[in-house]
């Protein structure tokens, strides 16, 4: 049975004696491996971040069909990544791109409630140039 008083941490003042019963001598034990936290710290200290940050490269902004996503609303970047991945699959794009809006027009219960129609709208937005107008050229001094 579950009892609330069993949910608290148990401190055993005679832990060494209890472990000795099973042949474990805590005073003779040595740490042999790093903890996961120690391994993470080592990895972060020695990691070459410039490889993923493209520190030595001049990046060019791109806005074109297939290179746009959703506006990030906190943690919606995860959903955006999944949708962009799905939209990049040729079979998914072919099924849901819907350039003639046939899927949206055929929605039985109305477009707002129809998952198929909403999927077609998002896929069309991500894979076509409709929401990817050309970038405006900005002067270099800005």
Image (tube, helix red, strand yellow):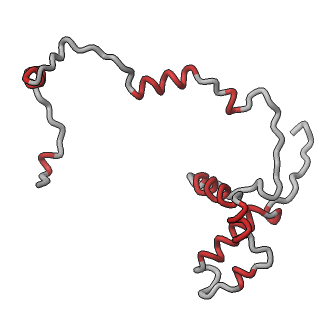
Residue at far front of view: 91
Residue at far top of view: 28
Count every numbered label the image shows and give the total: 0
Instruction: In the rendered view, tell whether residue 127 sits above or below residue 74.
Output: below
Instruction: In the rendered view, tell whether residue 19 sits above or below residue 134.
Output: above
- Is 58 displayed left or right of 46 in the figure? right
Instruction: In the rendered view, tell whether residue 68 sits above or below residue 114.
Output: above
The one of 110 and 136 positioned closer to us in this rendering: 110
* Residue 137 image position (x, y, % from top left): 91, 48
Answer with the quarter of the image where residue 120 lies.
Answer: bottom right
Which residue corresponds to the image point at 42% horizontal and 23% vertical from the top-left? 38
- Is 141 displayed left or right of 122 in the figure? right
Which residue corresponds to the image point at 61% horizontal and 52% vertical from the top-left? 77
* Residue 40 image position (x, y, % from top left): 47, 27
Answer with the quarter of the image where residue 28 lies.
Answer: top left
Which residue corresponds to the image point at 71% horizontal and 84% vertical from the top-left? 105
Which residue corresponds to the image point at 73% horizontal and 31% vertical from the top-left? 54
* Residue 23 image position (x, y, % from top left): 12, 20
- Quarter of the image containing the C terminus? top right
Answer with the quarter of the image where residue 58 lies.
Answer: top right
* Residue 91 image position (x, y, % from top left): 70, 65
- Quarter of the image containing the N terminus? bottom left
């Amino acid at each position: 049975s579950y009892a609330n008083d069993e949910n608290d941490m148990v401190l055993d003042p005679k832990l060494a004696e209890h472990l000795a019963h099973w042949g474990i001598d805590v005073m003779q034990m040595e740490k042999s491996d790093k903890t996961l936290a120690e391994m993470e710290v080592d990895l972060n200290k020695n990691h070459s971040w410039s490889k993923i940050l493209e520190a030595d490269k001049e990046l060019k902004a791109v806005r074109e069909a297939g290179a746009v996503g959703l506006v990030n609303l906190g943690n919606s970047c995860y959903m955006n990544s999944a949708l962009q991945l799905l939209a990049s699959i040729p079979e998914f794009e072919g099924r849901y791109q819907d350039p003639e809006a046939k899927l949206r027009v055929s929605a039985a219960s109305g477009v707002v409630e129809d998952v198929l129609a909403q999927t077609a709208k998002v896929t069309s937005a991500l894979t076509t140039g409709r929401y990817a107008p050309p970038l405006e050229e900005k002067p270099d001094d800005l």
